[in-house]
Image (cartoon, grey):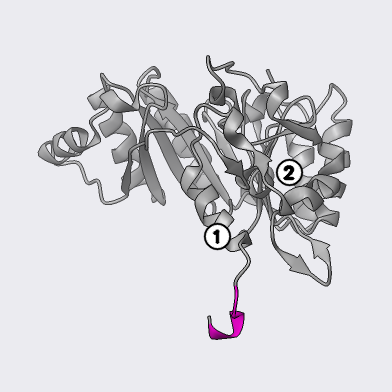
Amino acid sequence: MGGRHSCGTRYVHDAHVEPAGPRHPRAATPVRCLRAPDNTGRDAFELIGLFRSLGTRALTITGGGEPPEYPYLEGVIDRFVQNNIQVGLVTNGIHLDRLSRDTLRRLTWCRISHSDERTFTEEYAQSLEAIVCVAPRVDWAFSYVVTAEPNEEMIRKVVHFADVHGFTHVRLVADLLDYANVDLERMKKKINLRGTNDSKVIYQGRNKPRVGGPCFICFLKPVVAADCKVYTCCGAQYALDPPSRRMPEELCLGSAFDLDKIAERSYYPFPGDICKRCYYSEYNRLLADLFSRVEHVNFV
């Protein structure tokens, strides 16, 4: 949302939607997570119209809750596609069989979340294989949270499944709350020693969060939560000290139905020094440079 103009109009190119409460690569300006709806689904459908009016090209349906648990999910996906908005889905994969094959085929990509705390049974693998086979044009992927005591056998099963079934990648990412004790290099060596093909694996560590400062990322990738309010980022629930583990009022930018007005404030950074843990420091540094005045611009 921040910084892109065309004929004076602000655009939102990529949105993330969390339909069950408690980016596309070509997108330039994402809205991070929308947990819209109430019991009728009314909020979700109204927001679809707002996103379209803001020029949204792609959106990710993700979860604080599990998206397939949301009873209006298929209707929401259909409506976005009808509005020429590409849809990606983040899910734990357990209830993907609740979606029709037509709905699955409307997805551009689907990322299945996994962790050391889950099992990867033969029954689950067979169910997932059947789902992947009915939507072969969808870009499938895994994102696996690795803890300080990783379940090595489970990780190998996930990596092997992805390799056999043509997944685009497997992201092995360090546990956000204990990243300093996660050794991904050691995990890579163990996977290779067992002869597992890890050519599709992305080993993603974590950078130590810093105290926040002037924040522009909140306008580039804001969070729209289940209460239909906009928050600074997906890390807001961990930003304060101690972490609230929920979206704090101090980091609320306003109502989701006022996204156009929120976008107009993106010329001025949010005072992010309230955040004791900022996971987007490098983004904000780059964005601050982009918003800086450039002298003698013709020589740049």
Q: In the rendered view, does 287 fall on the left or right side of 145?
A: right
| Residue 48 visible within the image | no
> Which label is found at residue 77?
2
| Residue found at x 65% / y 42% | 218
Residue 17, magenta (yes or no):
no
For marks 1 and 2, the one nearer the N-term is: 2
Place of residue 282 in the rendered image (x, y in percent of width and height, measured from the top left): 46, 48
Residue reaching furthest bottom? Answer: 298
Residue nearest the viewer, comparing 274 with 116: 274
Toward the viewer: 241 or 84? 241
The quadrant holding residue 74 is top right
Distance from label 1 to label 2 (Cα)? 37 Å
| Residue shown at 84% from the left, 67% from the top | 8
Examine the image and state in which quarter residue 12 appears: bottom right
Circle 2: residue type: Ile
Which residue is at a point 81% across and 34% down the rendered structure image? 254
Q: Which residue lies furthest to the left in this view?
A: 193
Q: Is 260 situated left or right of 108 in this image? A: right
Majority secondary structure in the magenta region: helix
**Amino acid bearing label 1:** Asp
Q: Which of 223 and 98 is in front in this view?
A: 223
Q: Over which residues does the magenta segment extend?
A: 295-299
The numbered mark at residue 57 is none
The reply to whether dot 1 and dot 2 touch (C-beta < 8 Å) is no
- Secondary element type, mark 2: helix
The image shows residue 78, relative to residue 74, as above or below, that is below
**Residue 101: x %, y % from top left:** 64, 43
Q: Tell me the mark number nearer the camera, choosing from 1 and 2.
A: 1
Could you tell me which secondary element the residue under label 1 belongs to?
helix
Q: Can residue 173 be seen in this view?
A: yes
Can you give x and y, in whole percent of width and height, for residue 208 in the image? 37, 33
- For disc 1, the marked residue is 289
